Image (spheres, rainbow, N blue to C red):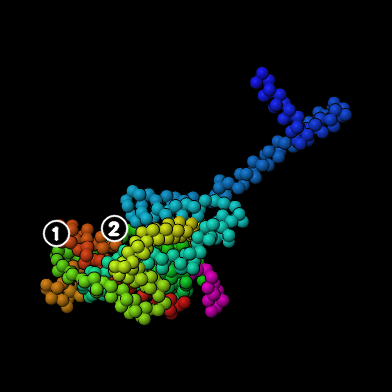
Amino acid sequence: MKKLFIIFSVLSLLVFIRPALGINTNSNAQSTLPVSTVEQVEESSSESFIQEAFDGIKQFYSYTGFANAAGGNLIMILIGIVFIYLGIKFDYEPLLLIPIGTGVILGNIPFVAGNQTGIYETGSVLNYLYFGVVKGIYPPLIFLGIGAMTDFSSLIANPKLMLLGAAAQIGVFATFLGALYLGFNLPEAGAIGIIGGADGPTAIFLSSKLANGINILPDGTTVKNLIGPIAIAAYSYMALVPVIQPPIMKLLTSKKERLIRMKPPRAVSQKEKMIFPIVALLLTTFISPSALPLLGMLFFGNLLKESGRTERLADTARTKLIDIVTILLGVTVGASTQADIFITKDSMLIFGLGAISFVIATMGGLLFAKFMNLFLKSDEKINPLIGAAGVSAVPDSARVVHAEGLKADKNNYLLMHAMAPNVAGVIGSAIAAGIILSFLG
């Protein structure tokens, strides 16, 4: 009985559905036609249905990535996979390379233009998130978190090591001159030059101001949008610090120099730690006011850490906030490397200049440390290895210095000494960016 009721219900439903689909009408019309005409109509309807189905499949295929893929997209997707592999397999800055690699893949999934999908299409979700890169919003927030997690004690205890951070900035100005020689205009060369500081957020901040594809030059031409290539180059070389720097250290230092043991840094009082961010903020921003967004947030974050009264704010800045911003920054910077925009001669030149500038910056710190030793007493000499930490890849560069020191002497701990030029490099690259921006912005 139950089965009969179900069958009856289905048949009743079909009765009501048939008129809505026009089935009854067709059948009635066909019944008044000759048999040959009915067969022709049925054959025509069948052919029309097949053609419509075929057209629908063709239209569906035209919207897929398979139909819109280009060789450049596949190359960039492969690069994104390599970034993710390096971050996972070799632990090369995984917090940066994994989001960037994922972003590279997202930005190079082939799509049909006009559907608000790509990062450069107004109204797309990625375009809204990319706003924080284009307008330089994310880098100051990154600096806030860096300030909240940085201990400036080693720099306060031995201020002369700040000179090593300054010396490493030679890479910035060497890259600037190299970019000019290769044909980039002044604003573009200024943005490219900051790669020499090995500081990703600073590179993004400066390129968003100078090489954003928006600014108009005096001759009426528009600057190129180099944010993606510059950011990817800066972060790539930051991640490759453990690969690039050790050979340069060994080449420019002798076994005797690598064995130099430095005096333990003096104890720094809490009062000194609280005063330092305020004094440093005033001095650095008066020297380079254009770097105020970066330096202001850096020392504000450090004041939150050292004041002893705002631990909740400091904890948020160095954990949740910087993690969120790192995710957004990494993914959007990676997604900005669409193949048609990224795979260009300019991008290749930028990567080449970045590699050279990083080498020059490392050499500048090392050689200046050796130069300083010429004027220091035997018991005050510094280990030249710590000069390599003058680049602002915090704290990876200091860790590499420490590891190289341990290879020469298992009891020679250089980490705290290396942190001084390392954090000085962060400050130095921000000041250099401000100086470049004040002249070229």
Q: Quadrant of residue 354 in the image?
A: bottom left
Residue 149: x and y in percent read 31, 63
Q: Which sits in the foreground, 212 or 292? A: 292
- Which residue position is annotated with label 1? 411
Residue at 36% x, 71% y: name it. 300
Q: Is residue 286 magenta?
A: no
Q: Is residue 439 above or below residue 97?
A: below
Q: Is residue 220 magenta?
A: yes
Residue 327: x and y in percent read 42, 57
Residue at 33% x, 54% y: name it. 92
Q: Is residue 261 left or right of residue 184?
A: left
The local crowd at label 1, few if under 14, some if 14 to 19, many if 20 or more residues have their Cα within 10 Å, is few
Residue type, numbered disc 2: Pro
C-alpha separation, residue under disc 2 versus residue under disc 1: 21 Å
Q: Is residue 319 left or right of residue 211?
A: left
Q: Which residues are magenta?
A: 211-222
